[in-house]
Image (cartoon, coloured by chain):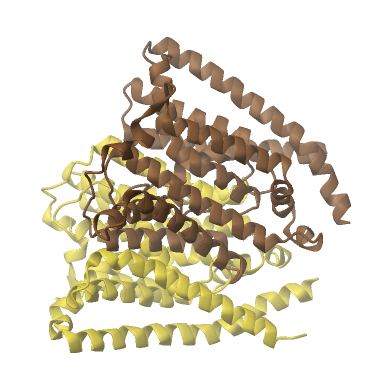
Chain colours: A yellow, B brown
Amino acid sequence: MSAIAMETRAAPRASLLRRLSSQEVLLAIAIVVLALVVGAINPRFLATRNLSDILLGNAYVAVAAIGMSMVIISGNIDISVGALIGVLATISGSMAVAGYSIALAWLVPVLVGIAVMALQGAVIAYLRIPAIVVTLGMLSILKGGLISVTGGKWITDLPDSFHLADIELFDILPMPVLIMVGATILAALWMRYTAQGRAIYATGGNPEAARLCGISPQVTVVMVFALHGLFAGIAALLFATQLKVIQSTVPPNLELTIITAAVVGGVSILGGVGTVIGSTLAAILIAEIASALVFVSISPYWIRAVQGGLILLTEVADIVRRQRRVAGDSR
Amino acid sequence: MTSLAAAPPERRVPRWLARHETLLAAVLIVALAILGALNNRFLTLDNLLNQGRLMTEVGLIALPMTFVIITGGIDLSVGSVVGLCAIALGYSWKNLGFPLPAAIAFAIALGAICGFINGFFITRVKVPPLIMTIATLALYRGFAEGISQAHSVRGYPEWFYFMGQGELFGVPTQLWLLVAAIIIAGVALDRTTFGRSLYAIGANETAARFSGLPVDRIKLLVYTLSGLMAGVSAYVLVSRVTTTRSDMGIGYELDVIAAVVLGGTSIFGGSGTIWGTVVGLVMIQLLKDGLALTGVKGDATIVVIGTVLIASTLLASSLQKRRDVGG
């Protein structure tokens, strides 16, 4: 029995290397090729200003996609994260305006994010309610709660020191990019080289086998959701501080963009496979596509159709690849 | 082995379900009484018929969603299908010059095609229903937005509003449609091979396959039905609100899934009834109406529906656990 368990645990690790290279290289090539093609049609696309806008304005999506990737790798899903980011951004902005210290206005939303997500993780893991039901319910609770509490009123007059996203380290390294790259590398290393990180893959790949290996799938799921909450909190800070106002509503369909980044980044919805480097590259690619549409005079209203098409394409490619691998493994 | 495993739940589930629905119906009556006592405008024929009118769009989709969830699947794309079909109706009539009846037929057929695409990828390519319908949730809404370019379509002829605003024998027109759909869905689920196959697939898909059931064809049909009814719902909705916008149907998946799950259909598949879904549907509509009449705003209402969704799943799952332990 344990031999089988070991095998299923080892298998994703071997294929992980293969997938890691293929999916990430593929995404990196796509990012460069798209930039060159769109740049050839409209050279203004390649202006430093535009490229940095794409990166800075969407770093929060990439940060949130790190947590989403972990959730999906563990075999779950979360559609409440967009609403949560809206709520956390509003909490953060309200505290800053109410005169709390900036450190507190940055810290509290992150803690609330961790708490809300850990709670969802606990309901999913211990009460065995499917993640889609819990997070769909939480999505409407957060969304309805936010609008009925704030009335959709904009938060303005934010103190200057509040704007985390405007900070530039050594005057050249903007904070959003620093956080995006740092969080991606740390998360990737952690997931690859620590026992807890590997436990996420094991739980998603085969919870029963993971249990027999001495991993608690329940504890792993709660941990994954808590981390997802941490990244959602950081994403909310970047989101809240990049503009001079906070709209205190739920950013429409943000969860779809985040899920798209995770899935297109090579995280398999069947659980057990994927990396956060892929999801960060995918988040950049999606932002690049959204910007490119404008530069080649295609209406930005098509962006969501593009996202849906990308998810579908990646999933079908992933499943076909898996089937081929199973067929090749003939035993 | 399979017959041994499948037999006991077959006998036990209906009895428990009957209890769940009776319980729900009892709660419903108490809720009606309380809301009626709190507000004298609530228990009037006018208000109740009007609530029936408002309930139809979600109700039409909740019926096939019951089928989908009984087979152990889910369809999150229904709200986006409503949006796309509404746009297809308005756009084909206004911009492509379709006669209005043809535009209605086109919209409904497009809904069926959307559902078919979901079913095709789920059964043939084996994309899990959850991710497939999240992808098309984005895709179909994206098409609705891309085609409409945020333009709305208005100015339909008077006869078009009969379905959404008219009355037939003193009852809102669309309520007849809903009642007919409920009867057909109820009979189909309870009295036909197709209906019974859904339970078999949801309880144990592999066993159903080995029993010779055309599992893939049945699932394909169920997702197509889901899209088709979303198309019909889009027609009723456009006719009721007199305009077509690309954001129509946003969030319908919450109401629909909440009604089905509240009605006692197991989110894990294998059990559920149309009767339960109807009671769940009425409960949710009355909850919305009751909250609105007592002065709660629309946004707070979805907080309640979200809570109801989680709580009813928790309750159903703890009842299930107790039954499993007892059995």
Figure disc tally: 0
Residue under the image location 61 percent in, 41 percent down: B185
Residue B268 left/right relative to B179: right
**Residue B262 visible in the picture:** no
Residue B121 left/right relative to A92: right
**Residue B229 visible in the picture:** yes
In front here: A259 or B83? B83
Residue under the image location 44 percent in, 28 percent down: B52
Q: Quadrant of residue A15?
A: bottom right
> Relative to residue B258, is residue B89 depicted above or below?
below
Residue B143 left/right relative to B277: left
Q: Position of residue B62 (x, y in %)?
A: 52, 42
> Relative to residue B219, is residue B166 depicted above or below?
above
Residue furthest front as drawn: B99
Check the picture and name the quadrant holding the C terminus of chain A: bottom right
Residue under the image location 63 percent in, 84 percent down: A324
Residue under the image location 53 percent in, 59 percent down: B130
Check the picture and name the quadrant holding the N terminus of chain A: bottom right
> Relative to residue B24, is residue B97 depicted above or below?
below
Q: Position of residue A317 (x, y in %)?
A: 52, 78
Q: Position of residue B274 (x, y in %)?
A: 62, 37
Q: Position of residue A283 (x, y in %)?
A: 35, 72
